[in-house]
Amino acid sequence: MRPRIILKQNVVYLHYYKTKQYNNRFSTNKMTRVIKFTKMHGTGNDYIYVDSRNYPISNPTEVAIRWSAPHTGIGSDGLVLIGDSQTADFSMRIFNADGSEALMCGNATRCIGKYLYEYGLTEQTEIALETRSGIKILRLQVTAGKVESVTVDMGKPASLPVDLTGTGKRDMTAQPIEAAGQTFIATTVSMGNPHLVIFTETLERIDLPAIGPKLENHPLFPDRINVEFAQVLTDDRIRMRVWERGSGITQACGTGACATAVAAAITGKAGRKTDIVMDGGTLTIEWDEHTGHVLMTGPATRVFDGEIALEE
C-alpha cells in the first residue's frame, strides 16, 4: 500500500490506497478505521501521538514500524499511545521506530503534557503520568493558554551494575569499555531506562553511526542500551549526541540528557544543574541535592495533526 497525503488547513490527512496489483494479490475483508494523530517533537525528538482511549491500536509494534518510516509512512522516532491510568492521571506507552517498546522517554512526556492541556483533556498544570518506569510528575509553564515549557520530575537516578570482569556485577563509573577496536571510558546510569555515557574532548570526531550500534548491542548489555557521547563545554553546559536503543541517531533524548548530567556530576565534570545541548535543542537538567530527584525542563512543539487509515 502507498500513502496519499492531503493537506487542508494545516492538517495532514494520510490515506493508504491500493494499487490494482495489490487488490488482485491481497483480496481480503479487513476492516479499515481512520485514526486521528498528532505529530509532536521535543527538541527534535519526534513521535506520533494517539489518544488510544478514543483510537485503540491493537498492534502497536507493527503500526510503529509502518508509521515511523520516513518515506512510506508519517516519519518519526516512534509511536506514543496516551491512555487512562488507575494509578495516575494518564498513562503513556511508547514504541520505538523498530517496534520495540521503550520504558520511558523524557521528550515524549513533555509533549504529552502540552497535548493534554492544549487539547482540553485536562485543566491541571501539574499532571501525574504513568510510564513503564514509574509515575512521572509534569509541571506545565502556561502563557495565554499555551504550554511554553514543561518540567518533568524524572525521579531518582540509579546505578546500572554490569559484569565488567566476569566476576560479578558492580557499578560502572568511569570504567573502560571496548567496541569496534576502540576503548572508551564510560559510566552507566539508569533513568528508568539504561544509559551508557561517554565523555570526550573531541565530540565532532566520534563516528556515531558506526560506533553507536556496536555499543548499543555490546555483550555487557543483553537488553541493549542507549548511548550518549558528551563534551563538557563549561561547568554548566555540555554538548551531547545520542544513539537511542531501538531508534538509532535522534535529535535529542530526554532521559539521555538526564543521564549525561548525572554522570557529569558524579565524575566531577560539572555541577548539579546543567544545560545539555543536543542536535535538536537544549534541555536544562537539575539534580536536586535535597530530594535526589532529577528535574528536566524544556519545550514541546506540535508539528501537525492528521488522520491515517489503519487496516486491521
Image (tube, rainbow, N blue to C red):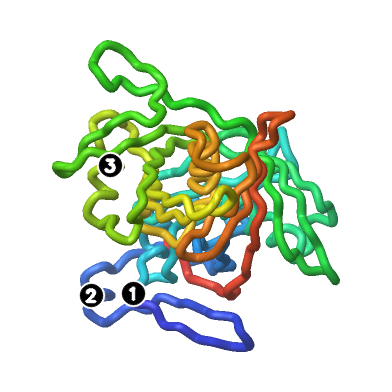
The residue lying at 58 percent from left, 73 percent from top is: 303
Q: Indicate which label's residue lies in the foreground, 1 or 3.
A: 3
Residue at mark 3: 215
From the viewer's side, name the closer residue of 267 and 182.
267
What type is the residue that disc 2 sits on?
Answer: Asn
Horizontal relation, residue 43 to residue 70: left or right: right
Q: Indicate which label's residue lies in the foreground, 2 or 3.
A: 3
The residue lying at 41 percent from left, 28 percent from top is: 173
Q: Quick check: can you spot residue 104?
A: no
Which x, y percent locates residue 48? 52, 62
What type is the residue that disc 1 sits on?
Answer: His
What type is the residue that disc 3 sits on?
Answer: Leu
Mark 1–mark 3 Cα distance, whole angstroms, equals: 28 Å
Residues under numbered marks 2 and 1 in contact, where contact means CB atoms less than 8 Å apart: no
Residue at mark 2: 24
2 or 3: tag closer to the N-terminus: 2
Q: Which mark is residue 187?
A: none
